[in-house]
Amino acid sequence: MSAQTTNRIARSRHDYQAPAFTIKTMQLSFNLHSTATRVTAVMQVNRETPGAALQLDGQHLTLIAITLDGRKLSAEHYQLSADGLVLPEVPDSFELCIETEIAPQHNTALEGLYMAGNTYCTQCEAEGFRRIMFFPDRPDVLCQYTVTIKADAKTYPYLLSNGNKISDHIDELGLRTVQWHDPFPKPCYLFALVAGDFDLVTDNFITQSGRDVRLELFVDKGAAAKGDFALQALKRAMRWDEQRFNLEYDLDIYMVVAVDFFNMGAMENKGLNIFNSKYVLADAASATDRDYFNIESIIGHEYFHNWTGNRVTCRDWFQLSLKEGLTVFRDQEFSADMGSATLSRIDAVKLIRSAQFAEDASPMAHPIRPEQVLEMNNFYTVTVYDKGAEVIRMLQTLLGRQLFASGLTLYLKRHDGQAATCDDFIRAMQDASGYDLTQFALWYSQSGTPVLTVKQQYDADTKQLSLTLRQETAATADQATKQALLLPIAVELLFADNSRQKQLFCLTDAEQQFVLPDVATEPVVVWLEHFSAPVKLHCQATTEDLLQIAAQASDGVARWDAMQQYWSRQITAVMQGAAVQTVITAELVALLKQWLELPAADLALTAELLTLPDFDTLAEQHDEIPVDAILSALSSIKMFLAQQLREAFLQCLHNLPQPAYRYQQQDVAIRRLRHLCLSYMAQLAEYDVVLQQHYQQADNMTDTIAVLMATQQAGSALFPQLRDDFCQRWQHDALVMDKAFALVATDPADTVFAGIAAMQQHRQFSWKNPNRVRALFSAFSMRNPQQFHRLDGAGYRLLLEAITKLDPINPQVSARLVTPLLSWRRFDKTRQQLMLDALQLLAAQSNLSNDLFEKVSRSLP
Ligand code: ZN
């Protein structure tokens, strides 16, 4: 069979129906071959719905044979289409055996069974299993798998699947047969298979109940030393989940495989995680502090899925945030405990304010539990994941850590082995805590970013402080009317005598007033401490108030946030025509100087206080994004600060110790502050020598990249020469070349187009590798506003060409690339037209993937 077009019918959340048939056990066999792998499934099928036909999903499969209870079926017994197989009349209980053939080598979409270099591997979430076998490819059909893999023993020393290995032998011809059994029933999206040759790094972990778990990490040959950090991070994650949530690992073996071709970060397949090698491999020479941070957090994320995702899975894909929002929240809490809680929270807040707010304001706006989906891969979004995590965090804030933990325990106990819904989760939280979460549950169905407007009024006679809070959520592309949400608003009051008071308000109405009695003097109010709700805040704080909060709030995130508000205001003033020297006052310069001379105990926080909000964050503060005004205000303020603080930066740099590289919180903070200094100093040619020296003396990737980015962003004459040196030195290392590709693509200079064209010819570049494509084109479209939004449209055209080329190869990645174009309505008329032209050219193409079709069609007028 080979009908090419599949249908374009969106599914709705409300159309859910329980499966008409269940499948209790599955014996799955693979005879691996790069262009003709034979897959055989033997399934025990039971009818649940009287009269229903058996419908199995299947795509890009060649059907070889079907037998039912041992009888071979001929073509008149079934209907085959591009989307699957229907057997109209089947018994109530039977054994179904299906044989298919697939070509992993030709699978460039990287869904189903594919080849990552010489390695066979699978990616089945969300709906990739249907590219391996005809099956009800939905997360609420759970069955027990026994998997047999056959391949040449020499070429494929490791043949892996989920669960425990139950047999392994090699025949006289050198053909190896390995069998695996996973005792935990699971949906097919958690199935995994890997075959290849690797370096194996092993360790073990004794669980809190005393079971010995074998840990195995599989990496590219020769890369064993780069796997150590990930393996140690895994052990920290296992211990942390026991201590924080009393959750223990449940199999005797835990395997992690790093592959070079992967659409996303990593995948939580039961007992056999598959990772993008970018999120496993690290050493000081080739990985940055950020890489180390990401590795630890993603290793944690996939491990935490073992309970939140695998033991309790999702009933249908609309419930994705049930596992993803919750698991992101868990990995964020893990990162906070392993390193700097303040820094990791600041990073999370930045992501919400830039990418998530942008998504809410785009044609792809959706609640954390979407209502309508055409291509599920399009809903692995910053809304489902990261806003989803904010919703879980608000629950913890409302209930308190203890009740929240009890709620999680109840949820996991109640639904262990089941496919659950977001409503089930809320119900467990409610039952465990006694809170009425009816209104809170609106967060699951309402999209959009609430705007919170706050006013304070102090009455010196009555000693009353009145706080008036108002919330409003504007209509979004998917939803016209909005209701008032339950917002937990954490507040700190700072008094003149240095005393302070904390308070948590629950805003439930559109507008509410909270009156505090017996307030001796008027305090400065720190609103939304620790970003207690994912909203846009409008408050009347004066610039003096903001600077006081930045200096004194007890929450580091609140201090950073006050400075962000402060910088935003000054940037806005410059955009409206004020002269930089009147906006950046002498008092401010004096304060910043003081911070640089006597940095806070947390050096990284000092660096964050001095970091201007990025373009995307500023953009979200405007309905129509004034691209040029934002960029020019940012660069003039940055230059002015560099000039005013030139000695302070140099002095601060000299005062910082330079210990040998270790990925360790204090050292990360030192480097963060050093890099902040360098990023300002790069503005001034007089410091070229200092920057050059830093580049030459760097003994780790973090320092090297810092100099490259500083000189690039400053438009320094040093940059091209350093960049070329870097490319030369690392040309053999694909993961480091991704950093080089991104450095070329994010260069704000006009030469970026020639640079990107040249890099497409680099021997490490390949359209088939998502990391390479993202390093060049996502970096360009998402982190180079200057050139992407050029008024001659060249930036948009470059992206259009890349998407056009990529869509037939890898639709999942091409659909992610199109994101920045979807927001065309947010720009001025000229840019609107140019972006729309690009989208219309895409829409006119024949054979557009469903992934791209859904996004493009949602965005067109
Ligand atoms: Zn996840």
Image (tube, grey):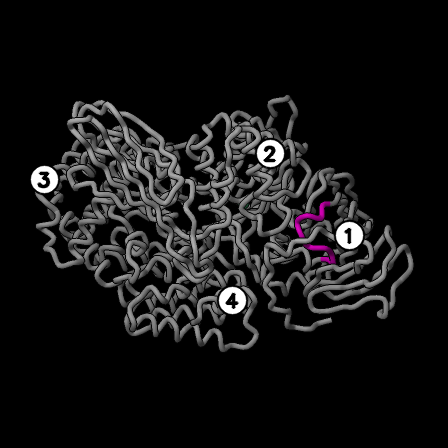
Q: Amino acid at mark 4?
A: Leu
Residue at numbered disc 4: 852
Query: Furthest-right residue in view?
Result: 71
Query: Furthest-front residue in view?
Result: 462
Q: In this rendering, which labeled residue sits more in front, label 3 or label 2?
A: 2
Q: Are marks 3 and 1 in contact (CB under 8 Å)?
A: no
User: Tag 1's secondary structure?
Assistant: strand
- Pick whichever, 683 or 342, lies toward us: 342
Sequence order check, earlier mark of 3 and 4: 3
Q: Position of residue 251 (x, y in %)?
A: 67, 33
**Real-space Cα distance between discs 2 and 1?**
26 Å
**Real-space Cα distance between discs 2 and 4?**
36 Å
User: Tag 4's secondary structure?
Assistant: helix
Q: In this rendering, which labeled residue sits more in front, label 3 or label 1?
A: 1
- Left or right for 84, reference 499: right
Residue at numbered disc 1: 21
Sequence order check, earlier mark of 3 and 2: 2
Sequence order check, earlier mark of 2 and 4: 2
Answer with the quadrant where ligand 1 appears in the image: top right
- Left or right for 646, reference 831: left
- Say the numbered circle drawn on residue 411: 2
Q: Position of residue 852 (x, y in %)?
A: 51, 66
Magenta span: 133-142
Q: In this rendering, which labeled residue sits more in front, label 4 or label 1?
A: 1
User: Tag 2's secondary structure?
Assistant: helix
Q: Amino acid at mark 1?
A: Phe
- Left or right for 103, reference 809: right
Residue at numbered disc 3: 587
Answer yes or no: is residue 296 visible. Answer: no
